[in-house]
Amino acid sequence: MSDPLVIFTPSGKRGTFPVGTPILTAARQLGVDLDSVCGGRGICSKCQITPSFGDFPKHGVTVHQDALSEWNSVEQRYDDKRGLIEGRRLGCQATVQGDIVIDVPATSQVHKQVVRKEASTRPIILDPATRLYLVSVDEPDMHEPTGDLERLKRALENKWNINDVESDLKVLHQLQKSLRKGEWTVTVALHRPDHGPQRVIDVWPGFFEGPLYGLAIDLGSTTIAAHLCDLTTGDVLTSAGLMNPQIRFGEDLMSRVSYVMMNPGGDVEMTNAVRAAINELTETLATQGDIDPKHIVETVFVCNPVMHHLLLGIDPVELGQAPFALATSEVLELPASDLDLTAMHQSARVFILPCIAGHVGADAAAVALSEAPDQSDELTLVVDVGTNAEILLGNKEKVLACSSPTGPAFEGAQISSGQRAAPGAIERIEINPVTKEPRFRVIGSDLWSDDPDFTSETASTGITGICGSGIIEAVAEMRMAGLLDPSGLIGSAEQTGTDRCIVDGRTHSYVLYDGSAHDGPVITVTQGDIRAIQLAKSALYAGARLLMDQMGVETVDRITLAGAFGAHISPKHAMVLGMIPDAALDKVTSAGNAAGHGARIALCNRQSRIDISKTVRAIEKVETAIEPKFQEHFVNANAIPHKTDPFPTLRSIADLPDVSFNQGSGGGSGGRRRRRSA
Amino acid sequence: MSDPLVIFTPSGKRGTFPVGTPILTAARQLGVDLDSVCGGRGICSKCQITPSFGDFPKHGVTVHQDALSEWNSVEQRYDDKRGLIEGRRLGCQATVQGDIVIDVPATSQVHKQVVRKEASTRPIILDPATRLYLVSVDEPDMHEPTGDLERLKRALENKWNINDVESDLKVLHQLQKSLRKGEWTVTVALHRPDHGPQRVIDVWPGFFEGPLYGLAIDLGSTTIAAHLCDLTTGDVLTSAGLMNPQIRFGEDLMSRVSYVMMNPGGDVEMTNAVRAAINELTETLATQGDIDPKHIVETVFVCNPVMHHLLLGIDPVELGQAPFALATSEVLELPASDLDLTAMHQSARVFILPCIAGHVGADAAAVALSEAPDQSDELTLVVDVGTNAEILLGNKEKVLACSSPTGPAFEGAQISSGQRAAPGAIERIEINPVTKEPRFRVIGSDLWSDDPDFTSETASTGITGICGSGIIEAVAEMRMAGLLDPSGLIGSAEQTGTDRCIVDGRTHSYVLYDGSAHDGPVITVTQGDIRAIQLAKSALYAGARLLMDQMGVETVDRITLAGAFGAHISPKHAMVLGMIPDAALDKVTSAGNAAGHGARIALCNRQSRIDISKTVRAIEKVETAIEPKFQEHFVNANAIPHKTDPFPTLRSIADLPDVSFNQGSGGGSGGRRRRRSA
């Protein structure tokens, strides 16, 4: 009789094996992705499989009930102790007895796909740089004297075929005790860098199940946002953010660089501040996630170039002046201890994505990793909105990148009633084009402000200000309601026909909410707010336009809004404002915090770390600061939505009244005067 | 006309080159070893060569006076500034004009041979792991944004063909400033480990001539001895020693291990103490050598296993009990900062030689590197005498190794009048076999004590005690003078016929020097001293004998006495004592501090670091503690020179009176009774 046939699903891999072959062995020989930490000892349960019985005409086999060996004592013990899902077997214990079809559930795959909550074209294939391996180490022998470490290495080579391993000195300090406590069986955490030997990070006595954790940190100028991820599932356990404490040295990047120029040693102060904040954030995440922070063995950082240098302890002054030279641009793989990140595992490793250029940082590289314009057929514009906007334009053929200094207006700074996105902040706004009356929603409630229950529902938070997405909607709605002319002037009460437009010095403001009757704030959109938003959106649009020039196109196929608050921006309002080029609304999507997601990809999948270096090297960099056309694009983009670009798609779906409130050219007429061009 | 012929001496390499080819270029193409740090810019002067003119029938050429280009402005400038030796040219400036014979002086060779002061079979070929390279780095360019580090790497690749380079984060902190201060020309120190990428250790603006320095440290249980070496010449600038401060925790290794067992955290105390001492020693050497300690970029350590673990911060308790398991045995290459060695360069690297076994350390490996028994035709016994003796026996076929716990008696400890080798210590002794009167020499004077000027010459130091080599000579001379019987008993005044043998409790002592008349010490050799020396020498001899058993030989061809005080031991006296096997005196030589010299070899020649791992792996380890025959050898070796081994060569040159002072078997007879066997 010939050897039984073993068929694995979903891979479809198949082969014949002698009776008695463990399923794990068969899987390995066929290259089927079946996990195992303990290497087949029935301890780790990672190799669970589900046998299928009956007729399988598709595969051409019939599987009998006795096609696998009987449930053995190891499986029984495991089931008693931890419980095995009905129908599951341990792949290392169950052996082939006849033709069999074996399903490998997703949870038993090493390279399982991580389900992403947000809509995305790119799932993460789990393959973290740090993994656990159970090994039995030979006991020391006076006749063959070798070190414990050398015998550990030999065990890794014999059992796991891993033959180029180095160890941290810190591990050597604990190695002897772990080996003896585990009676010469230990679980080793091995970190595999981009190139070079693997590194022993830690050694636990006996079987250590883990999980090990990693942090994906988006280190922004204003906010430090971090995900705590389980490295064996790829899941985000919890997320947290913290204000960047460097804000006290300067609100934006250039003011921080100036601080260093004016205050020798200021870079060291800022470096210490941000590292302390990351330690604090690490503790916070561990507490939130109810884990031991010392089980965090990896951290991936994405950040702009100035934050990159300040994190590394490199003077950022060169980044403040042409030619904006980076000290180093390529990926960095470092011990966390080099960055004083002491809250995590003592041998934790840090990976920092590459910088694209002196103004286009590792955050932009992370966006490229997350949104992958280089793998898109459609010409895609990716805009990461923040204090500095990172802009990518490209497709499979070519990708261009630049950054544009939008300033902090989109984050609610420099706005009279601006605030961070927190409960009580106005985030959605509609203005009735006839009555000019607004209604709005605040963070923390799903009700609109004209709902009878709105007041009671928002009583606890109050109505406290306008967040970034709220100010964009406010300005766009004012423009559509004829309260704001294309040049960005707010009309008077007479001009607009609503007494919500009040005199504010020599200009006008629009009253969005008057809470003064019950000691609440008066929330207005002032002329100054409009100017701040105009500067920010002009910079953004000019950057995108510069890349389109470089690419030789007038339109793009798809626009992705990324950034912490990109998810909350209404595409229509963004287009009315003229933040982004004209496009069909269904082609404008949000990617949420793409930089943070890129960090998570790099954390969970080590191949992506290698890929991103190639991707970044292939990206063509455009330096906005030295392109003469940038200034021209910037000036033209000041109008709302634009002085010269026609925005035909937008005009087909939105009414943009052609008013002018310039006092010299029609002030006091009170009317909505039609003009040829907006 | 055909291209001119260029002949290099002493290599004899030759080739034809077009007129105008720089000599450095010709040398490189032919693989002639001609140094250059600046890569041919006429800055470093490392490529100096000496042209020869006239008829060279041996080479078949006639060299005319115009065979090289004329002295140029670069050479003139260099000569004005620094002075060029008469007849020398700069190899990068002088170009080929006709047939020419070029001598490369030793100082212009990269792999020059380091002259060793002590007699030795093995010179050091200079090839340090850390070298300097001058490079011109491209300036940053906004259109091609790359980091300064990446452009530095590119320059190293283009100019020096070095393409796998990593950088310390600490270097990145200084890189920008160095590049700009040097106007994009910098000197890079690159460290090349055993395997893996080279590492940027430092970057200096412009041309940095060096030299860089290294330390070769022999970290002993009692003494820490270090050489400060110039890495560009291999010369030892200065040497210094320090007591190992761990002595306060225990005199010998086992008492230090016990200290850790009894005092949790005691290992950390000892680690901190020894690291602080090394920092102190580094400062001392830098001061002595008048160099900047921050120019010390490499340190090589050799040490026994317990010191090895304590230096690394590893608990040594496992080394105190069978199976004497090392935490790690292979070579280690670490940042000096991992060992808190802060006195040297911040990115200095440490190399530690491999341990051979739990009792046979990196010091024995260093002895193997220095004395190379594995490259000897003669069967060589190498004995490194210290608190623990390391013993190697072998030849080209096979090398065996063991260690033997001799205790500190040979270093003057446990000896009633023992002291360290310092001025005033008795180091040489002769006893007249007829009169039984001694004469001696002390360290600090070349006169014997019976010289009329001896007292005045030694007035400043006094006569203070007996050092290690002195006690060996004293015991051997007492034996030859018939004051001591083969069993190790000192005879009484009656038995020996000299009143220098005085009663000392129930035993006798021999008065070597009586300074009591002028308030000096009475220096005696007591029965207890004899017993301590007997124990030490028995352990040493038994170890050597065990290796001879294992090798299947009764005699060896050559004996090398190594160790800090090995140089001072008289071979004849050592053999009378029975420390070492019987051999022709001219085959017993001293190697001085062979372990320290091995450290210096590893410091100066990186290939030796790779070779020693292979050598150590091939050495057969013999564990004295578990070999039953060791005890038997030990007991038999207690007699002076030996109970059973005949020592025929020794007996042909030395008179060994066959006396017995055992009170029960002839005490009081006062005679020198002949017995059959000694």
Image (cartoon, coloured by chain):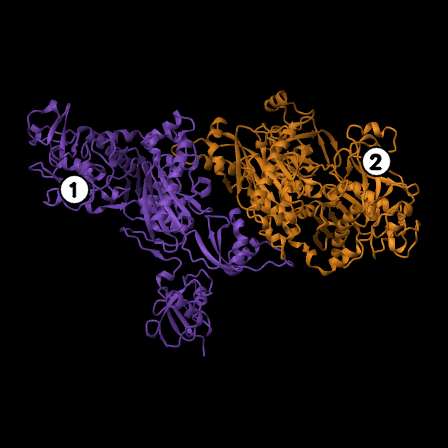
Chain colours: A orange, B purple
Q: Is residue B364 above or below residue B208?
A: above
Where residue B109 sits: x, y (%)?
A: 38, 60
Up-down relation of residue A361 to residue B553 (above or below): below
Q: CA distance from mark 2 to mark 1?
A: 104 Å
Residue assigned mark 1: B459
Q: Which residue lies under the disc numbered 2?
A: A514
- Residue type at the position of mark 2: Asp
Q: Is residue A246 above or below residue B211?
A: above
Front residue of A238/B391: it is: A238
Mark on residue B445?
Answer: none
- Report crowding for label 1: few under 14, some 14 to 19, many 20 or more residues within 10 A (C-alpha): few
Residue B88 in picture, x, y percent from top left: 36, 68
- Tag 1, which secondary structure? loop
Occupied quadrant, residue A213? top right
Q: Position of residue B360 (x, y in %)?
A: 35, 37
Q: How many marks?
A: 2
Q: Quadrant of the N terminus of chain B?
A: bottom left
User: Dot 2 surroundings within 10 Å: few (below 14), some, or many (20 or more)?
Assistant: some
Say yes or no: labels 2 and 1 on the same chain. no
